[in-house]
Image (cartoon, grey):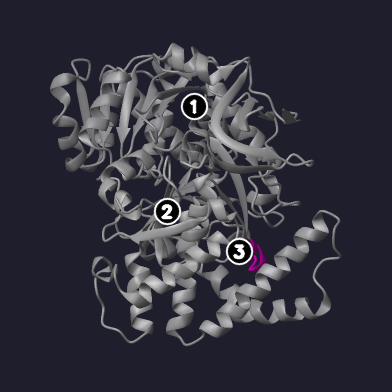
Amino acid sequence: MREFTVPPLVTAPPVGGLADVVFDHADADPDRVAFGRQGPDGQWRDVTAAAFRDEVLALAKGLLAEGVRFGDRVAVMSRTRYEWTLLDFALWTVGAQPVPLYPTASPEQVRWILHDAGVTACVVEHEDHAMTVGSVVDGLPRLTRLWQLDTGAVEALTAAGERIADAVVHRHRMAMTTMTPATVVYTSGTTGRPKGCVLTHANFMTEADNVLQRYEGVFRTRPGESAATLLFLPLAHVFGRMVQVAAVRGRVKLGHQPELGAAELLPALRAFRPTFVSAVPYVFEKIFTSARRAAEAEGRSGTFDKAVEVAVRYAEALERRAFGTGPGPGAALRVQHQVFDRLVYARLREALGGRMRYAMSGGSAMDRRLGLFFAGAGLTVLEGYGLTETTGAATGNPPERIRFGTVGRPVPGTGVRIAEDGEVWLRGGQVFTGYLGEPRETDAALREGWFATGDLGSLDDDGYLTLTGRKKEILVTSGGKSVSPLPLEERVRAHPLVAHCVVVGNDRPYVAALITLDPEAVAHWMALRGRPARQPGTLVRDPELEAEIRRAVVAANTQVSQAESIRTFRILAAQFTQEQGLLTPSLKLRRRAVEAAYAREVDALYGA
């Protein structure tokens, strides 16, 4: 058993709730720009601390007028947008508990969460969401109110609250304690039915305030610079929620962007010009892929590839120097880096708004080489690790001493323990109080103050955590070999043509894989070869494409023993989607569902 703990820099206040900072900040600095809000015309407009306070107060009064009471649970089903943040803080002001719903959730998922949480009211974004809720409402007798953002819900609630005195709202706010439940966030349900994690105001305060103090230099990369972040993570996910809370508490200007596609995200980054962002590895993969495709389209692929190699070597040299194992980049490498900074890296940074020097990544593992490239190109991505049950980040790489390929050291106030079987256990003020209505599940997860994550990992001598897989996902071949599928899958998926890779082999004689293709990448690959565009599903037996994917599999196999290597694979015609129930809303694989849906293809891999 191994353990590493970092003492807290900040402790949660003994009284008060998350909404208090909205009123405190407005009193202290009413004209400070707290938000950037994009209008229907695409233009960004500033929202001051005082203006946001007034909107929160008015909406809180409307919620009270419409019957929302202290302790009520109110569901929010929407993409990431300004109104979600407004609703969160208005609900916290009156002591209610927001319950997030993914905008892509199925009727069955919506029904389960609304029923399990005992939700009494629901806010949806648009008519499709309203119809989803409406289709299951007959089985939800406690759900009595439904508001729709795109038909003026905020304005209607604000008007309804005009007769409520401010003092009534403040009495509710003052009744809050830090241990009051702030929200119930449901797990993504990769291995079963989602469970509701009860997170308190103290959980968010502890997490946000320690991260803000430890990573102050990340948010404001230049002296006197006003920090700003563009939030495009789903607010239904705890990562996005933590970023939102931290931005408001840390006086960081916050903007919202509902779409993750490069066509929408890159223009928003250029217009908003954040000083840092938080994202999942998928976003950084897409940014890299978009940059490389642009270079190929301009006939500069050779230059781009050389720039990638220089950036990786440059970042590796800096990493060795940070840990005292090397002198840093040599003179020749520094010159090469300066040349490519003008030709490639500066263009990439400008495409991201021009002010960003750091970013935070979580949600899943990031490829070490990709992290090195971005660092060498002047955008250092700090990889971290956390779960819904830990209110976001439990570990993170420190900006001054990054160990790429790891998820970093414990954030202040957090302990990490590796149990005898390799399971990662976590302890700290951000760890949840339990699963809603699930005492047995809670007792199984919380062990003498430690949360047993179900993830497998190792700690090095400096306290850096490396994740190796999930306990429930370890495969055991019929020959008795234990295989962690995650590292293999990540290495195959690093190939730009691969969308997903699922390693199989439980109780089978050898390891095999199911692979899906990225349609955009395949179209680009075909165009570069002068071949007519075809749907990826028609290319699954294409010899040239199959040879390209085989090279990715062979490269992945070089990192493992022969018994753990992928012996054969099948390229699938279709994509894994949330609608099929094969991906969680945070884009993690539902492994059991994939294997069940493609049981025939799996059997074929073994000649059955």
The quadrant in which residue 42 appears is bottom left
Note whether 431 is above or below 585 in the view shown: above
Which of disc 3 and disc 1 is earlier in sequence?
1
Marker disc for residue 19: 1
Q: Which residues are magenta?
A: 372-379
The amino acid pointed to by label 3 is Phe
Q: Quadrant of the N terminus?
A: top right
Q: Is residue 325 left or right of residue 345?
A: right
- Give the SS element for disc 2: strand
Note whether 587 is above or below 242 in the view shown: below
At which x and y percent is residue 535? 24, 70
Q: How busy is the neighbourhood of tag 3: few (under 14 within 10 Å), some, or many (20 plus)?
A: many
- Give the SS element for disc 1: loop
Q: How busy is the neighbourhood of tag 1: few (under 14 within 10 Å), some, or many (20 plus)?
A: many
Between the residue at mark 2 and the residue at mark 1, the CA separation in whole angstroms equals: 51 Å
Q: Is residue 417 left or right of residue 540?
A: right
Note whether 473 is above or below 450 in the view shown: below
At which x and y percent is residue 483? 53, 44
The amino acid pointed to by label 2 is Ala
Mark 2 against mark 3, which lies toward the viewer? 2
Marker disc for residue 512: 2
What residue is disc 3 on? 374
Q: Nearer the viewer, residue 606 or 55?
A: 606
Magenta run includes residue 373: yes
Note whether 150 is above or below 287 in the view shown: above
Residue beneath the point at 85% across and 58% down: 325
Residue beneath the point at 18% across and 15% down: 141
Magenta run includes residue 374: yes
